[in-house]
Image (cartoon, rainbow, N blue to C red):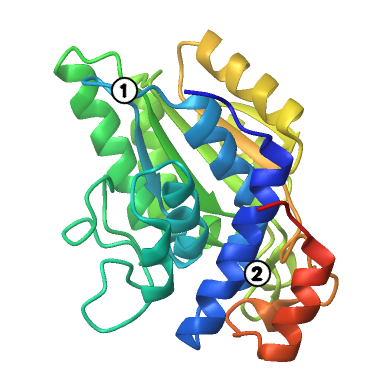
Amino acid sequence: MEIPDLPNLAARIRLDVLEMIHAAGSGHPGGSLSAVEILVQLFFREMKAGADRDRFILSKGHAAPALYAVMAARGMLPRSELSSLRRLGSRLQGHPDMHRLPGLDSSTGSLGQGFAAAVGLARGLRLSGSSARVYCLLGDGELQEGAVWEAAAGAAHAGLGNIVAIVDCNGVQLDGPVDSIKRQKPASERWLAWGWHALDLDGHSFESLEEAFREARAVSMPVALCARTVKGRGVSFMEGSCAWHGRCPDASELERARGEIGANP
């Protein structure tokens, strides 16, 4: 596969995300925009394809628009289908539905449950002798769910070296700053305490992501990548704002965002 211009692809994905949500009239732009580089790196540079392909679970399921846009860019669904987001009968539900959309490894939405499913999937793959790895993207607000740490303890106990948790540490959730609601910092130290190998990195830098995934492949224990990101990344009036966790941009806001993001076709 030819590797595209990743920064420009990320910009194109951001435009797709906002246009999808605007057309749907609802959705989650903030947490979708913060996860774009992570998803692009996973789908275009990191995950192995083929019969024994790597698996991916979007545990922060409300960021589905970013996942759908990256899948379309990867050729896993028609780009024209993106405009059907959240429509009645659409394959592109507001949260991922594996029974409607082929290519998804789990339905997600209830925070914490997707990660628990990822741990189970990793254990099953190892028992079957597969060399595939499991990648799971969580939000930092999602770490407030106790189910996350129960699953993390199970993965460490089983010595699962085939799972990588990526935490989108944008620092903002629906009701305000994550640490004002229930402190999660330093996230990497929490993962270390549960027996994981943990790294801090810049989640908007492809170079930083490349290096972190390379290190994750080199260790034989579960790995957590705590990626510093900005909620609403790329759109000045959305960045760092909890107001844009689940708000749809109107026509004038979409046009302003288009001007700020910019992207080649």
Residue at the extreme front:
265
Q: Nearer the viewer, residue 190 or 263?
A: 263
Quarter of the image holding residue 55?
top left
Tell me the tag on residue 158: 1
Residue type, mark 1 in image: Ala
Q: Is residue 180 left or right of residue 195?
A: right
Q: Residues within 10 Å of mark 2 (few under 14, many from 20)?
A: many
Where is residue 153 shown, x and y percent of the image? 40, 36
Q: Nearer the viewer, residue 46 or 10?
A: 10
The residue that label 2 is drawn on is: 30
Q: Is residue 162 left or right of residue 224?
A: left
Q: Is residue 179 left or right of residue 143?
A: right
Where is residue 188 shown, x and y percent of the image? 66, 37
Where is residue 142 shown, x and y percent of the image? 52, 60
Q: Residue at x 19, y 28 (%)?
A: 124
Which element is circle 1 on?
helix
Q: Is residue 11 above or below residue 207?
A: below
Residue type, mark 2 in image: Gly
The mark that comes first in sequence, 2 or 1, is 2
Q: Is residue 196 visible?
A: no
Where is residue 161 shown, x and y percent of the image? 40, 18
Q: Is residue 201 left or right of residue 219?
A: right
Quarter of the image holding residue 242?
bottom right
Q: Residue at x 67, y 30 (%)?
A: 209
Q: Residues within 10 Å of mark 1 (few under 14, many from 20)?
A: few
Q: Nearer the viewer, mark 2 or mark 1?
A: 2
Q: Is residue 28 above or below residue 201?
A: below
Give how far apart the Cα atoms at labels 2 and 1 are: 35 Å
